[in-house]
Amino acid sequence: FTCGPGMQWNCAILVHSSTAVVREVREDKSGRALAVDVIPEHGSGCLRLIALYQPTALDRAGASSKARSEAQRLRSVVLGWRSHKSVRACVLGGDLNETVVGAADRIDCNGNPGEEHIGTVHTMLESDGWCDLFRHCCPLSPNTGSTLGHTYFDPRGGSSRIDFVLAYPDP
């Protein structure tokens, strides 16, 4: 399933036909968010799979920037999708273009850990009740400077974790 054909952004979700029945597909008008409702073959209730592509460089975007406004709008869209009464659980995966825990999620070009960032992803985790599945499986350790989980590697050096898989409710 894809959304956003002919647009600047798009998302996709793959569902194997032998493991689930697709019930409904939703997409945001921007092409940055897509949701697919599946009924697992050996389960009960609706699982909503969400793909999200947030605006780039949110760590550096100001509070009143277009990128930050779009990120908050998309957060609201996803929150509405997640809150539907037929949805038993949600899994959201995407390029959220933002770090959360500075020392663990970002290393600058000089090898220094980044600063903690409070933005859209932080709000989704702390206020909206999403669980960061990577951090759930790989809790923070005192070892800073590790690139474990980083998904963006700058050719000049430095790296960051800007791609996430979130779950609701918290497992």
Image (cartoon, grey):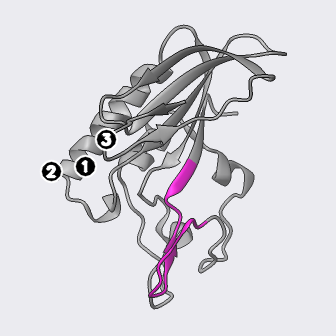
Q: Is residue 155 above or below residue 170?
A: below
Quadrant of the drawing holding the C terminus: top right
Quadrant position of the N terminus in the picture: top right
Disc 2 target residue: 64
Taking the image as drawn, is residue 128 in sight? no
Residue type for callout 3: Met
Q: Secondary structure at mark 3?
A: loop
Residue picked out by circle 3 = 7
**SS of the residue under disc 2:** loop
Q: Is residue 110 visible?
A: yes
Classify 10 Å Cα crowding around label 2: few (below 14), some (14-19), many (20 and above): few
Give the magenta-colored segment's residue range.
Answer: 150-164
Residue 20 position (above or below residue 65): above
- Look at the numbered disc 1 and give the secondary structure of its residue: helix
Quadrant hosting residue 144: bottom right
Query: Which residue corresponds to mark 1?
Result: 68
